Structures are given as C-alpha cells and as structure tokens.
Amino acid sequence: MTNTRREKPVTGTQSIERAASVMRVIAARNTTGLRLVDVSHHTKLERPTAHRILKCLMTEGMIRQDTETRRYFLGHLIFELGLAASSNFNLRDICQPSLVRLAEKTGDTVFLTIRSGYDTVCIDRREGSFPIRTLTLDVGTRRPLGVGAGGLALLMSLPDQTAEEVISANALRLATYNKLTVRSLVQMVKRCKELGYALNDAHITPGATSVGLPIRSRFDQPILAISIGAISSRMSEKRQEELVSLIRDEVAHLEATLESTAHP
C-alpha cells in the first residue's frame, strides 16, 4: 500500500490570516509598493499562493496593482474602511488639544483636515484671538484634494504617481477655486515639497495665507493635516516658518499618540 503524503487543507481561518499578512506587508511598504516576489518573501508564502490572495484582494478593492511597475499598493476599500473606523479612535478628540494650543499660541485659525478619496473634509476648526480672522473653511466642508493648505499638505505627501492620479481626477473641479488649474496645482505641490511644508498663498481666498503639515499613520500614510490660516499681512516668510515649527511639534505629538492608541 502506497503512503501518499497530502498537503493539509487550508482552513477559513488560515486564509484570513494569510490575507491579513499580505495586507500588513503591503501597508508597511505602501509608499514604494511591492512586487509579487517581495510579497512572497515577506509573508513566507509560495508565489502561487501569494498570487491567488493578491488577485482576490484586488477584486475586493483592498489592494491595487500599478499597471506599469506591477507593484501592489493598498486599495480604495482600505481607506474607506479606515474612515468608517476612525470615529472609534475619536480623531477629533485626540487632535483637539493640539488645535487649541496652536490657536492660543498663534492667535490665528487652526484647521484639522482628513483625506476622503480624492477629496478632503474639514473635521475641526479652532479660532484664535486675533480680531481679523480667516474663517475660510467650515467644519464639514469637502474640497478637492490639493485645495487649501491642508489639502496641499496631504497631496504633497503622496507618491508622485498617486498625486498625479488625484490631480487628473479633479481637473474639471479645480477652476471653481479661484481659477485654479492643473498646471498651477502641480507647481504649488512642487514648491511645497521644496519648502518642506504646505503653503497656500495663491488661491481660494484673496488676502489670506495658510500653512500646513500632514499627520502620518504608522505606515507612513498621510491621513490628516493641520493648517493655520491668517490674513496675508501677518504671514511673512519668517512667521510662516515659526508657525510651521509649532505645527511640527504638535504633529510629532499626535503621531505618537495615534500610534499608542492603535497599539495600547
């Protein structure tokens, strides 16, 4: 009698564990993406198995594959699920002390923005004591990603190809924001990268200037942005740098807080 060795069947629980492992390794390297061989290596899965899981996750929208590089990235569904879960992490409550401190220290208006697909949504705002305020953005306002300092902070932090996709998708919507164009937005993003922070002094509200920085997740993904807006006469280059320094301190604190909240 021949004793034939058979591979132990994979259970439903094991399938979920493997899929979760694949998504974790992609999330950890989502800026550059991963090839099939990389996914197989990091998850210790055979290539055919890794490929089947990747194909299924792509069908569900949980990951996507770049058509040119063939690298895998997190998909739109992961972001949508993250937004749905964000209320459980009380993002506004976590960020509120930082917004209050910034408003008190600067006297200006501070905004908290979250990314939502190709858009941004203002989820909180704190007003400073300076008598002339720039209330350019109400809580709940949705705008194309890249519009305003918060949107620029998020857009400038994305991989180049992703940023190009976002700008292209929003091309027809930009003109309503003080005649913003694809070309001018691309130039603004380039300037922001050179400066190291988001600077909006050319569109949306004449006479107002704002600066901002992104708040990143543990996977280095820009998920939120803090920006400060004021009348342009208060926003000299020196003061912009001072405000950015204050924001950067709060961002560092918030990123550490969000990390500990996700992993107590």
Image (cartoon, rainbow, N blue to C red):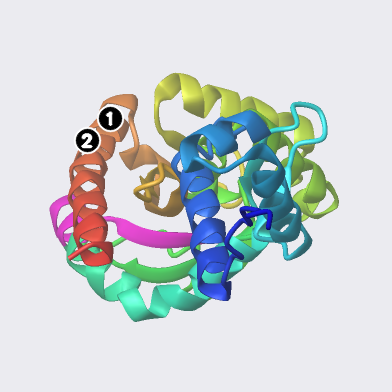
In this rendering, would 55 be left or right of 144?
right
| Spatial CA span between label 2 and label 1 | 6 Å
Would residue 106 be counted in the magenta stretch? yes
Instruction: From this view, report whether residue 72 is shown above or below residue 105.
Output: above
Label 2: element kind: helix
Q: Nearer the viewer, residue 136 or 130?
A: 136
Looking at the rendered structure, the kind of residue marked 1 is Glu
Instruction: From this view, report whether residue 75 is shown above or below residue 16.
Output: above
Q: Magenta span covers which residues? A: 101-115
In this rendering, would 166 be left or right of 78?
right
Q: Which mark is residue 245?
A: 2
Q: Which mark is residue 161?
A: none
Instruction: From this view, report whether residue 260 is shown above or below residue 36.
Output: below
Q: Is the residue marked by circle 1 packed among few (<14), some (14-19), or many (20+) residues within 10 Å?
A: some
Is the Cβ of the residue at disc 2 closer than 8 Å to that at disc 1? yes
Among all residues in the image, which is located at the extreme top?
194
Instruction: From this view, report whether residue 143 is shown above or below residue 204.
Output: below
Position of the C terminus, as image quadrant, is bottom left
Q: Which mark is residue 241?
A: 1
In this rendering, would 239 be left or right of 32?
left
